[in-house]
Image: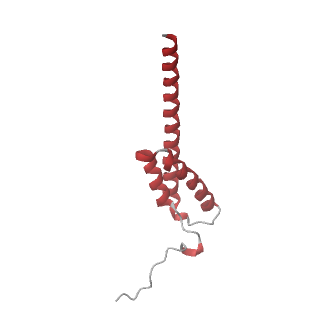
Amino acid sequence: MNDLPPTTHGNAPSGLEPHRGTLILVLGILSLVLCGFFTGIPAWIMGKGDLEKINGGMMDPEGVGTTKAGMICGIISTILGLLCIGFYAVVLIIAAAGAAAGQ
């Protein structure tokens, strides 16, 4: 038998709130690879909130690197998605104008 107490994931060491850096990083990577806005915006928002808590001393600072990386991935994905939507909108407008002029 194992004499060690069971591990709990309730609180980080020293009573701080545990960081969510891994979750935010996964959301950010998913936004770049597969899901776009659906995980990019939450990664951006969650990362910003967690970094504020880390800087305020309320959250475990161990996850600052992964939190920043996930937030940056979310930001990049969101901006690229907006640029793609803008590009397709311009192409659609040009195509519609060309079709109307051709009649």
Residue 89 vs 4, above or below: the answer is: above
- Counting every numbered tag in the picture gives 0
Residue 98 drawn at (x, y percent): 49, 15
Residue 39 drawn at (x, y percent): 49, 50
Residue 78 drawn at (x, y percent): 52, 42
Residue 58 drawn at (x, y percent): 63, 66
**Nearest the camera: 54 or 83?**
83
Residue shown at 49%/38% (left/top)?
80
Q: Quadrant of the N terminus?
A: bottom left
What residue occupies the far front of the structure in this picture?
103
Residue 76 vs 60, above or below: the answer is: above
Residue 85 vs 75, above or below: the answer is: above
Residue shown at 48%/57% (left/top)?
66
**Nearest the camera: 33 or 97?**
97
What residue occupies the far left of the structure in this picture?
1
Residue 18 vs 30, above or below: the answer is: below
**Nearest the camera: 35 or 43?**
35
Write down the quadrant of residue 15 in the picture.
bottom right
Residue shown at 53%/36% (left/top)?
82
In the drawing, does residue 76 fall left or right of residue 48?
left
Write down the quadrant of residue 18 in the picture.
bottom right
